Image (cartoon, grey):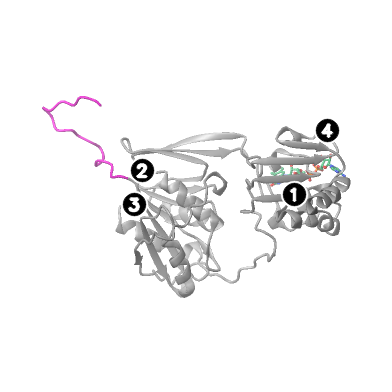
Amino acid sequence: GAVRCACRPLVRAYATPASPHALVLLEHRAGVLDSGSLSALTAATHLGGQVTGLIISGPEGASVVDKAKKLKGLTGLLHSTSELYSAPVPEAVSPLLTAVLGSTPYTHVVSATSSFAKSLLPRVAAQLDVPAVSDITSLEHDAASNNTTFTRPIYAGNAIATVKASSSIPIKFFTVRGTSFIAAPSDDNASVDVQEVDPIVVSDSPTEHVKTSLTKSDRPDLGVASRVVSGGRPLKNAETFQATLYPLADVLGAAVGASRAAVDAGYADNSLQVGQTGKVVAPKLYMAFGISGAIQHLAGMKDSKLIVAVNKDPDAPIFQVADVGLVADLYEVIPQLVEKLKQ
Ligand code: FAD
């Protein structure tokens, strides 16, 4: 350590950095905690200090709170409930978050890179005049200097930026890319105390929730599935897309994904698009059938653990990221695969 002169009092621009205390937004739907929030919690534990969860819910939110109490890594849990929060809009929730941040000296505010948080966190950060770092894939907190350094992909994942939020930023806001951190597990023996926080009712909110339209599917959710079967342009139309890919997805228990070409042509729903302008996935197994491997598609799947590609063109760029590649016609390969897997 540095030797300090005892003759003069040490002058610091900032108070001795307290050990980190993160506030993690825990989002949920239909009584289930979002897996992205669980990954955000894991990221928050990497800061090395206390981690308090924040659940905002309608009156039906009690079951989520019970589940959250058991999350490994949490040292505290706040819950705010109001009719207003049954389908929250960022405008209505931001005063609550601001109030919570005013009550305790949190050092970090953390959430998943979700649509809701993408609107909420920068809004509150701007009001507090601090920056927000989005979609981070790793982080390191130096307790001595109180700097937090993040990495985040830029240019559709073609470059990784290293960003330092320095000690001069009193509260560091960041959103977390779910595929980069494991989901925080539950520990049945764990139970943190829950502190209720009064809701803040905004009477003059410029926006109100009208309705939520969700795509219903019996298949595993693309965002969290451990196996994904994806199809591209040569799947011809919606009928062929389903008739060809679904039997394979069913036998593997996999989610179905699609390239943008397949989505734009109407073969598959928007929610199935994988890539820069779709979902970012990192399953254990990603199978790409008739997908060329455009850079915008790779941005959404290249971190998958095992990539299997089937393409007629031996020069297709997908083969550059594939662990297993087969130059073949997907219409010959898929039925054989399904047959073999069923055996
Ligand atoms: P194609 O490029 O047409 O490739 C089809 C492939 O199938 C070819 O490689 C061909 O050899 C092979 N093939 C043909 N027939 C068979 C067969 N019978 N058996 C086996 N193989 C066969 N794309 C995304 O996917 N996701 C995104 O999020 C995304 N975002 C974008 C954002 C921007 C700003 C831009 C400009 C583009 C974006 N794109 C995205 C589009 C991307 O650039 C490609 O156009 C798209 O991914 C191509 O889809 P594809 O591979 O299905 O089709």
Q: Is residue 223 or residue 340 the one in the foreground?
A: 340
Residue identified by numbered label 3:
106
Mark 2 burial class by Cα count in 10 Å: few <14, some 14-19, many 20+: some
Could you give the CA–CA distance between mark 4 and mark 3, rounded to whole angstroms? Answer: 53 Å
Residue identified by numbered label 4:
314
Q: x, y (%) of residue 135?
A: 53, 45
Could you give the CA–CA distance between mark 4 and mark 2, rounded to whole angstroms? Answer: 51 Å
Q: Residue at x 69, y 64 (%)?
A: 218
Give above or below for 78 relative to 306: below
Left or right position of 199 against 225: left
Residue identified by numbered label 2:
169
Q: Disc 3 marks which amino acid?
A: Tyr
Front of the two marks 4 and 2? 4
- Farthest residue, direction front: 343
Residue identified by numbered label 1:
230
Front of the two marks 2 and 1? 1
Q: Are marks 3 and 1 in contact (CB under 8 Å)?
A: no
Of pointers 2 and 1, the one earlier in the residue sequence: 2
Q: Disc 4 marks which amino acid?
A: Pro
Q: Secondary structure at mark 3?
A: loop
Mark 4 burial class by Cα count in 10 Å: few <14, some 14-19, many 20+: few
Q: Residue at x 46, y 46 (%)?
A: 43
Residues rendered magenta in the picture: 1-19
Q: Residue at x 50, y 60 (%)?
A: 27
